[in-house]
Image: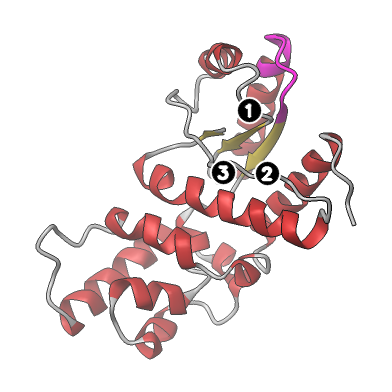
Amino acid sequence: MLVCEGPSDEWFLPVLLQRATHQLCLEHFPGGVDVGDVRVLAVDHQRPDDIARAVARESGAYDVLLYHHDGFPQRTAAAKVDEVRRAIVEAGSTELFVPVVPVVETEAWVLADPDALARVLSVPVARVRELLPRQPKQVEQQADPKELLRLVMRSLVRRHRRARPDGDSMERYFSELAEIIDLDRLRDVPAFADWWKSMAEALIRLGFRYG
């Protein structure tokens, strides 16, 4: 189950994290793990008490709570993650808690794979690569990943193809990006690598044997 920040995160993260968990299990848990769809819990991600109550109502329906909070400012983000973790424990939840904390925000993970972005936008991949960092780990050095994504949209989509009749909002592409983004490239992004490690540890605590 997933608690996340906003609409674009709801399009992107559930699909991405389900894919990533499935890949993690294939690589490291040879006994087999049944990975269900990641369901979004409709609750304000900034209100720990509300989250704790919502989680309590779902007790037994999931094994791991994925809590997303953008990682900037770092101190504020870390404090909120700890606050939510404490609230859930104090409410009596026994399900495992795994933070999902992109640096600076979720859009940084989208920028890690220019090939996937070019494919979804139907624009030349060479032009996308010109605008994005060369290495996946460099996406976390972008001060405003969301604005860089808007730049790609403004400078390439309108230039290289006609706009979609239903509009060219980036949110419309997030779920498709989540389906095809290269997980190996994402694992070179430190914040995603941290999530991967934490998720593996959670699966071990659930009793699955790491092989």
Separation of residues labelled 3 and 1 (CA atoms): 30 Å
- Relative to residue 201, is residue 190 drawn left or right? left
Secondary structure under tag 1 reads: loop
- Which residue ends up furthest to the left in the rendered image? 165
Mark 3 residue crowding within 10 angstroms, few (<14) / some (14–19) / many (20+): few
Task: Tell me where residue 73 sits by quadrant.
Answer: top right
Residue denoted by label 1: 62
Residue denoted by label 3: 73
Mark sitting earlier along the chain (3/1):
1
Report the disc number at residue 75. Answer: none
Q: Is residue 91 magenta?
A: yes
Q: Is residue 176 magenta?
A: no
Query: How far from the left and from the top, in percent, is residue 209?
Result: 89, 47
| Residue under the image location 57 percent in, 50 percent down | 17
Q: Look at the image and give the residue range highlighted in magenta.
A: 88-96
The reply to whether dot 3 and dot 1 touch (C-beta < 8 Å) is no
Q: Amino acid at mark 1?
A: Tyr
Task: Tell me where residue 182 sits by quadrant.
Answer: bottom right
Report the disc number at residue 34. Answer: 2
Secondary structure under tag 3 reads: loop
| Residue under the image location 9 percent in, 63 percent down | 165
Is residue 153 visible to the viewer in this orientation of the structure? Answer: yes
| Residue under the image location 75 percent in, 19 percent down | 94
| Residue under the image location 46 percent in, 59 percent down | 178
Mark sitting earlier along the chain (2/3):
2
* Foreground residue among 171 and 19: 19
Q: Amino acid at mark 3?
A: Pro
- Relative to residue 156, is residue 87 drawn left or right? right
